[in-house]
Image: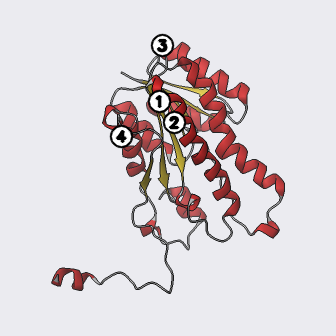
Amino acid sequence: MSTFLITGATGPVAGATIRLMADRGDGLLLTGRNQERLTALDIEYGTTGKVETFQADVTTAEGAQAAAAAAVERLGGLDGLVHMVGGFHAGPVFATKPDQYEELIRANFLSAVNATQAVLPHLNGGWLVYFGTPLVTEPLAGMGCYAAAKAALMAWMRSLAHEVKQRGVHANAVSMTMADTPDARRQRPHVDFDQAIDPELVARAVGFLTSDAAAGLYGSIVPVLGKFGFSTPLAAPPPRPSVLAEG
């Protein structure tokens, strides 16, 4: 059995990952700021000493340290971190205030720094998993604030991977686009969710990155993008199914 701290466990994408890891027998401490959602997770998955919940705000160093300490105390140790904390903002540069940048950097980047610094002293080998976006390499208009915060996270993760790999710690990331969740569908009724990602596919990637199957990966970014793709009028459309069938 491996033991993990899952930060941001109250988020809309986390449920599938929690379920996969709990089903394979991992010990989990699920953390988040929303106590109501934590209570619901405890009802669904909670087992004393196996899957427990803990309210913490890991955008602060104090909250992250408390969460890591609770994980060690309740689970008997720690083998890794799945960091699912994040925030999103879209808007043009002229309308995005500096405090919005600070908020997204705190949510997407500094929270990862805090959680990792809290967990690392307890690891003797293990896994660290973070979450990026394809906008890191191809930022779209109006997405600069979000893309910059995630770009900072990905650059930092790749540097971290070099620092910890000699200790047998694997630091990697999942790059994903919008997840197909009930919340997302309510908030964005105009979006074509055919290009969104099923959270179950994200969970499988996390399961892979927290297993011996990923023994050779250090600083990798695994894309889980489904049918998502950047498009431009300058490019030809994809071939029609009938053309592909004709060979």
Query: Which of 77/199 is in front?
Result: 77
Q: CA distance from mark 4 to mark 2?
A: 17 Å
Residue at the spot of label 3: 76
Identity of the amino acid at label 4? Phe
N-term-proximal mark, 3 vs 1? 3
Tag 2 near tag 1, CB within 8 Å: yes
Mark 2 or mark 3, which is nearer to you? 2
Q: CA distance from mark 1 to mark 4?
A: 17 Å
| Quarter of the figure with residue 30 | top right
Quadrant into which the N terminus falls? top left
Q: CA distance from mark 2 to mark 1?
A: 6 Å
Identity of the amino acid at label 1? Lys
Mark 4 or mark 3, which is nearer to you? 4
Quadrant into which the C terminus falls? bottom left
N-term-proximal mark, 1 vs 4? 1
Query: Which of 44/140 is in front?
Result: 140
Identity of the amino acid at label 3? Gly
Q: Position of residue 96 (x, y in %)?
A: 79, 63
Q: Is residue 104 above or below residue 75?
A: below
| Residue 165 numbered tag | 1
